[in-house]
C-alpha cells in the first residue's frame, strides 16, 4: 500500500467512482481545541457530498509539530464504505452530510 501526499483524487469502489478532496486540514479551534482533518467525498456525477471528519492526530494533542497528511486508497475506501453504511445517499440532494470516522477511516 503506497501512501499518497495528494489532497484529492478518485477511487473506484464496487464499480462506482467517488471523487474526494481535502476539505480541511487539522486545526486548532478556539471553542473545541484541536480538530482533525475533514475530507469531502462525492459519487461522480452526483449532487450530495459526505464530509468525513477524522480525530485530531495524537501528535498535535501532545504539542508536536504538524505533519504532512497522508491518505491512501484503502483509507478512502473505508471512509466511503463507512458513510454508505451510516446512511449516506450520494444521489439525494441537500447539504453535505457529516460523518465522524476513526483514524483509519472506519
Image (tube, rainbow, N blue to C red):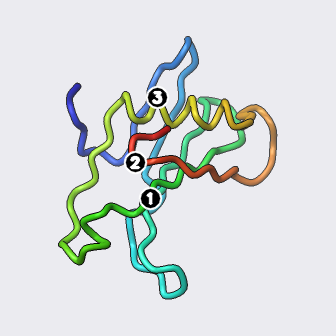
Q: Position of residue 8 (x, y in %)?
A: 39, 43
What crowding class fits label 1: few (fewer than 14 Cα within 10 Å), some (14-19), or many (20 or more)? some
> Regarding mark 3 in the picture, which secondary structure is present there?
helix
Find the residue positioned furthest to the bottom: 30
| Foreground of the two, 19 or 72 | 72
Q: Residue at x 36, y 29 (%)?
A: 73
**Which circle's residue, 2 or 1, is located before the other in the chain?**
1
Q: Please tell me how many numbered marks the rendered image carries.
A: 3
Q: Position of residue 14 (x, y in %)?
A: 55, 13
Instruction: Residue 46: name its quadrant.
Output: top right
Rendered-image quadrant of the N terminus: top left
What crowding class fits label 3: few (fewer than 14 Cα within 10 Å), some (14-19), or many (20 or more)? some
Q: Nearer the viewer, mark 3 or mark 2?
A: 2
| Foreground of the two, 26 or 47 | 26
C-alpha gap between disc 3 and disc 2: 13 Å
C-alpha gap between disc 2 and disc 1: 6 Å
Q: Identify the mark at residue 103; answer none if there is no mark.
A: 2
**Which circle's residue, 3 or 1, is located before the other in the chain?**
1
Q: Residue at x 69, y 50 (%)?
A: 97
Q: Nearer the viewer, mark 3 or mark 1?
A: 1
**Which circle's residue, 3 or 2, is located before the other in the chain?**
3
Q: On screen, 81 above or below 56?
A: above
Q: Are marks 2 and 1 in contact (CB under 8 Å)?
A: yes
> Regarding mark 2 in the picture, which secondary structure is present there?
loop
Q: Along the horizontal axis of the image, is 104 left or right of 3? A: right
C-alpha gap between disc 3 and disc 1: 17 Å
Determine which residue is flagged by label 1.
55
Q: Residue at x 20, y 61 (%)?
A: 67
Q: Are marks 3 and 2 in contact (CB under 8 Å)?
A: no
What crowding class fits label 2: few (fewer than 14 Cα within 10 Å), some (14-19), or many (20 or more)? some
Q: Residue at x 51, y 37 (%)?
A: 79
Determine which residue is flagged by label 3.
77
Amino acid at each position: 500500500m503506497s501512501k499518497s501526499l495528494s489532497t484529492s483524487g478518485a477511487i473506484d469502489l464496487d464499480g462506482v467512482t467517488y471523487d474526494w478532496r481535502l476539505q480541511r486540514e487539522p486545526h486548532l479551534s478556539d471553542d473545541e481545541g484541536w480538530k482533525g482533518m475533514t475530507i469531502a467525498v462525492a459519487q461522480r456525477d452526483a449532487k450530495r457530498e459526505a464530509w468525513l471528519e477524522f480525530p485530531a492526530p495524537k501528535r498535535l494533542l501532545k504539542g508536536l509539530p504538524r505533519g504532512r497528511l497522508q491518505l491512501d486508497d484503502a483509507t478512502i475506501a473505508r471512509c466511503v464504505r463507512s458513510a454508505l453504511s451510516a446512511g449516506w445517499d450520494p444521489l439525494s440532494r441537500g447539504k453535505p452530510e457529516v460523518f465522524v470516522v476513526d483514524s483509519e477511516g472506519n
